[in-house]
Image (spheres, rainbow, N blue to C red):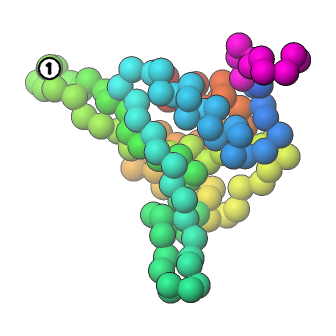
Amino acid sequence: MERGKFRAEPLETPTNETSLMRQIMLAVSKLTGVRIFRNNTGFDATNKVRYGLIQGSSDLIGWKSVSVTQEMVGQQVAVFVALEVKTPKGRATDEQKNFVNVVNAAGGKAAIVRSVSEGIKVLS
């Protein structure tokens, strides 16, 4: 590729999770009614502060607006969404798998995704 030129389309499966996550966020930003945000989790030992939702919560969280039943015609509700981003060789922890399962069991949409197209498929 010529210096200073950019790819018209992103790589389908980047080699690191951060790059893949950014590509998924960009692609999802084009979907109608879907909003996702980066969910960093961890512990700052210096300030003794935990951040993020909970241990095992997904990398990307947000909502998808959906129309509901006839008696509520015209209204929309936000369905919680969560994407745990992994490279093709990346492995989800038990806590991450559990978080995805709990979100789905509660009526949300959650998945472990390994490509931009998998992320879009979950949220479309």
Which quadrant of the view contains residue 23?
Answer: top right
Question: x, y percentage for residue 11?
Answer: 77, 25
Q: Nearest the camera: 50 or 105?
A: 50
Tell me what residue is drawn at x 56 percent, y 25 percent. Answer: 27
Quick one: which residue is furthest to the top in this view? 8
Using the image, determine if residue 53 lies above or below residue 59.
below
Question: x, y percentage for residue 46?
Answer: 56, 86
Q: Nearest the camera: 105 or 1?
A: 1
Q: Nearest the camera: 68 or 2?
A: 2
Using the image, determine if residue 37 lies above or below residue 41.
above
- Magenta residues, start to end: 1-10
Question: x, y percentage for residue 5?
Answer: 77, 17
Q: Is residue 107 visible?
A: no
Identify which amino acid the numbered label 1 is placed on. Val
Left or right of 80 in this view: 60: right
Left or right of 82 in this view: 33: left
Tell me what residue is drawn at x 46 percent, y 45 percent. Answer: 37
Secondary structure, magenta segment, majority class: loop
Question: x, y percentage for residue 21?
Answer: 64, 41
Q: Is residue 65 visible?
A: yes
According to the image, label 1 marks what residue?
73
Tell me what residue is drawn at x 48 percent, y 70 percent. Answer: 51
Check if residue 6 falls in the magenta segment.
yes
